[in-house]
Image: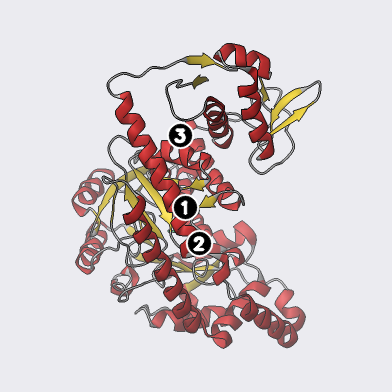
Amino acid sequence: MYIELKHESEVPLYLQIKNFLKEQILSGSLPPGSRLPSTRSLAQRLGVARITVQEAYDELIAEGLLSAHVGRGTFVQGPSGEPPLPTPPSEPPWEVSPSRLSTRAILRDMLRMAASRDILSFAAGVPAPEFFPVDGLRRAINRVLRREGVSALQYDVPEGLLPLRQSISRYLVDVGIVATPETILITSGTQQAIDLVARTLVEPGDAVVLESPTYIGAIDAFEARGAKILAVPVDEEGMCLQTLKLLLIRYRPRLIYTIPTFHSPRGGSMSLERRRQLLALAREHAVLILEDDAYSELYYQESPPPPLRALDTSGYVIYLGGFSKTLFAGLRIGYMVVPHGLRERLMYAKQTADLHTSSLIQWAVNEFIQREGIHTHLRRIRVACRERRDAMARSMERHFPPGVAWTLPQGGLYLWAKLPREVNAFEVFFQGLARGVAIAPGPAFFPDRSGEEYIRLNFSLHPPERIEEGIRKLGETIQFLLERARRARPKLQRVPVPIL
Ligand SMILES: Cc1ncc(COP(=O)(O)O)c(C=O)c1O
């Protein structure tokens, strides 16, 4: 590990040391419990005054990232302020491929950043908690407990509470999906539905098609199952069918996982024409489509094209929906609409996983849908999210240097931006963190971990003034990285110094 000190830089030396260490800590390169060199020895090695190193350490201590113990030294605390952990005595006895580990580490970091109060985060894939209709939920739970009593707290069937499945069946009619309650299975979030499908339909070594980029939790679920991932690029109209066709012929995959509407992370939607062509290909090659529809209710212009499941006449689509992005992410209510032939297998997979999703929470969500007016709530969050999307786009116009490109999404939660050639998403991630702002780096979303030219920004998490502040900091970060890259091009004066 090396610190590059730039003596000619306008950034004071103590701040360069601090920023470097902060990046190392937040990225996990310096894990909690790591002992830092003494100020004297680091100062000697870097050729700077001891007070310079002391100032860097002091600021990191003030931010809760380091702790100093008299007679023992200075230790990494970790971003959440937990006490130093003892270093494990030896390597753990299991093996994890480094690439798989890194995706998980990124996901964990993103969630941790979003939870840290010091960081203005656009990184996480979560909805803004101030939109959660808490009073409505309180009323719904009270009514359920009064009316259903202990039966709302008893075990239930794995496929889920019948009244909730009936409500979802009625709810889906509005988006053109005809699904009887028997074909609906309640899951603990859409994530569990993806996992159950992977466990039920994919054997280790089977090929599975994913979009590239795609939802990180789907990459994890299929990788954990030992699937061979086939990545298909996505353009403005959705998944590129030319590539898909070749892969279908060559590898005969078990499944095509797609997010056709308000794609995460890209934000765009598959055109109606492309949806029809995709369905035709699935039929021709007899391959199932797993349609993840996590975001379609969050539209800010006209409503999106119908889901694949609504257009499917041959039973090739498993449809996934849920209430995480629209009602309460933490209640973990999702559902799948399954072709008849798969119902039993998926139901037993659910039973094996956790018997069933919480009875009380299923009752409460059903009560909310029926009595608290989900459509009124949806209208309210569409207005608020649209305002935040527009605020972020305006701030990006104002503060991002030329060379950053993005398209305004018509729905969902994310702005997907392409960086100038000289700037890398991980650098923006770490340098942004050092300035108190978090983004999700593109490689988290690519099955092959490419995409270092992209960043994803969740525009829904903060009110417009905070968005403006965060985007300004991000603009400064990108500008700083651009200038650094341009300065470095003619001659880069590096002073590599090992510190640990
Ligand atoms: C595309 C997509 N699918 C599924 C999920 C998981 O959602 P849930 O909370 O319903 O498990 C997410 C969450 O970010 C997502 O973005």
The amino acid beneath tag 2 is: His
Q: Quadrant of residue 189?
A: bottom right
| Label placed on residue 462 | 2
Q: Amino acid at mark 1?
A: Gly
Which element is circle 3 on? helix
Residue 17 appears at what percent x and percent y? 55, 26
| Near-viewer residue (10 or 194) | 10
Amino acid type of the residue tagged 3 in the rendering: Ser
Comes first in the chain, label 2 or label 3: 3
Of 22 and 282, nearer the camera is 22
Q: Nearer the viewer, residue 268 or 352?
A: 268
Disc 3 residue crowd, few under 14, some 14–19, many 20+, Cα 10 Å: few
| Residue at image point 60% right, 64% down | 330
- The answer to the question of whether label 1 and label 2 lie on touching residues, with beta carbons closer than 8 A, is yes
Query: Taking 132 as reference, is 213 above or below it?
Result: above
Q: Nearer the viewer, mark 1 or mark 2?
A: 1
Q: Residues within 10 Å of mark 2 (few under 14, many from 20)?
A: many
Rate crowding at label 1 as few (under 14), some (14 to 19) or many (20 or more) other CA atoms within 10 Å: many
Spatial CA span between label 2 and label 3: 32 Å
Q: Are marks 2 and 3 in contact (CB under 8 Å)?
A: no
Identify the residue position indicated by label 1 in the image: 470
Q: CA distance from mark 1 to mark 3?
A: 30 Å
Q: Which residue is mark 3?
A: 99
77 horizontally vs 210: left or right: right
Residue that appears at 29% across and 41% down: 420
The answer to whether residue 15 of the structure is visible from this angle is yes
Where residue 183 appears, as percent x and y from the top left, is 46, 74
Query: Quick one: label 1 or label 3, which is nearer the N terminus?
Result: 3
Q: Which of pointers 1 and 2 lies earlier in the amino acid sequence?
A: 2
> Does 489 appear above or below 185?
above
Judge: label 1 CB < 8 Å from ligand 1. no
